[in-house]
Amino acid sequence: MTGTMTISHHISRWISLPLFVLGAMAFQPALASKESDSELIKQIKSAYADGAYDKFNRLAADLPQKSIFRPYVDIWQFRFFQKGVEKQFPDQELVWNKSEILPLLNKHDNSWPAETLRRDWLEQLARTAQWTDYAEQRQHLRYRPDQGVECADLMYSAEQGQLVRYKLDAVLGFDKRLPKTCRVLLKNLYKRGGVSAQDLDRHVLQMVAANQLTNSIKFVEEFNDTAWGKAIDSQTLREAIFNSDKYLKSPSRSTDTDLYLTGALARKAVDDHERVARQIAENYQSKLSLSSEQWLWAHVGYRAGLVWDRNALNYFKRSNPDVMSQEQQEWKVRAALLLEDWNAVLQATNEMSPNVKEDRAWTYWRGRAMAQSGKLVEARQEWIKASSPFSF
C-alpha cells in the first residue's frame, strides 16, 4: 500500500508541474549530451591541429555517430590521411580519389565542412585540368565560392574561350598572397598570352604597396620558369622594396624591367605621397614604362585620398582606370566628391569595373552627378536602381 501511495504521490507531483518545466526536464539529457559533445569536439579539434593522429582517432571514436559535430570529425579524418599522402609527394599535384571523397560528400551533403571539402577538391580538379569532373561537381556547390574557386572558375572559362577580363583584373589587383589556384591561373594565362608581363608587375606592385613584401618576392620566384620571372632578379627587387631609400640613392642600373624602381617609389609613397609625386614628375618619368607610371599615379592618388588630400583627384587623372585596383577606382570617386567635381564623379563611376560600378552606393552617386548636370530622368533611373532592394 505504501508503495502504491508513493507512486501515486510522485505521479500527482509530475501532473501538477507546469508543462514548460516538464519540457525542460525532458530536454536535460539531450542538452547534457550536446555539452559533452561540445567539450569532446574541442579536444578532437586540438588533436587535429596538432597532427596527433592516434589521439584524434581515439577521441573521434567516442563521438556519437548522430552528433551534430560528426561532419567535422569525418572530414578532418579524411584530411588527416590526405595530408600524410601530400607530405610524401610534396612536389606533385595530387587529386583526391573520386570514389573516396564522393561518399563523404554525399553523407554530409549541405553541411559547411562538406562544402569546404568540395571547394578544395574543385581547386584540385581545376589545377589538373579535369574539366568533366569539375563541371559536374561545380554545380553541386551550394555556398558562395571562395577566392580559390573563383580562380578555378576563371580557369574553366579560359578553357571555354570565355574569360571575363574584369574578374581577372580583380585577381591581379589583389594585394595579398593569392591562393595556389589563383597563382596557377596567372601562370597558365601568362604562358598562353592571356596575361602580360605588365599585368604580373601590377600584381607584385599591389602587394608591395600593401606591405606584403615577402609575399611579393615569393610570387616572383614561383614564376622563375617563365620569361617574366627570369627577367627579374629577386635579390635586386628585395633591395628595392625593403630599403627603398638606399636603392633610390644608388647609381641607376641597366635592367630589363622597371619593376625595381616602381616598387621602391611605391614604398616611399606610403610615407610621403607628395614627395613621390614630385619625384615622378621631375626625375623618373623617362625612366618608367607607361604602365608603371600610370600605376604609380593611381597609388599616389590612393595614398593622398586616404588623408583627404585635395590633390588626390589630379593624381588619379594622370593614371588610367585599366591599371587601377577596385579600391583605387573607389577612391578616385571619393576624391572627386571631396572637390564636389560632379563631372569627375560621373566619369569616375562610369569607368569602374562592372562589379564595382553596380554597387548601390556608387549607383546613387552617379545619379547625384547626373542630377547636377540637369539629367534628372537619368538620375531618377539610377536612384531607383540604388533603392531596389532597399539600402540607404
Image (tube, rainbow, N blue to C red):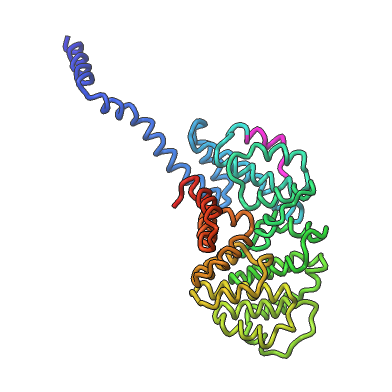
* Secondary structure, magenta segment, majority class: helix
The percent position of residue 208, horizontal first and vertical second, equals 63, 72
Question: Which quadrant is the N terminus positioned in?
Answer: top left
| Residue 139 picture quarter | top right
Q: Is residue 28 above or below residue 232?
A: above
Q: Residue furthest front?
A: 374
Q: Quadrant of residue 304?
A: bottom right
Name the foreground residue: 344 vs 157. Answer: 344
**Residue 125 at x, y percent in the picture:** 73, 45
Please tell me in which quadrant of the rendered image residue 135 appears.
top right
Direction from residue 38 to residue 82 in the image, left or right: right
Q: Which residues are magenta?
A: 95-105
Q: Is residue 28 left or right of residue 326?
A: left
Vertical relation: 121 (above or below) 329: above
Q: Is residue 104 magenta?
A: yes
Front-lying residue, 57 or 205: 205
Q: Decide whether residue 151 is among the magenta residues.
A: no
* Front residue (pair 136, 74): 136
Asked whether the viewer can see residue 175, the reply is: yes
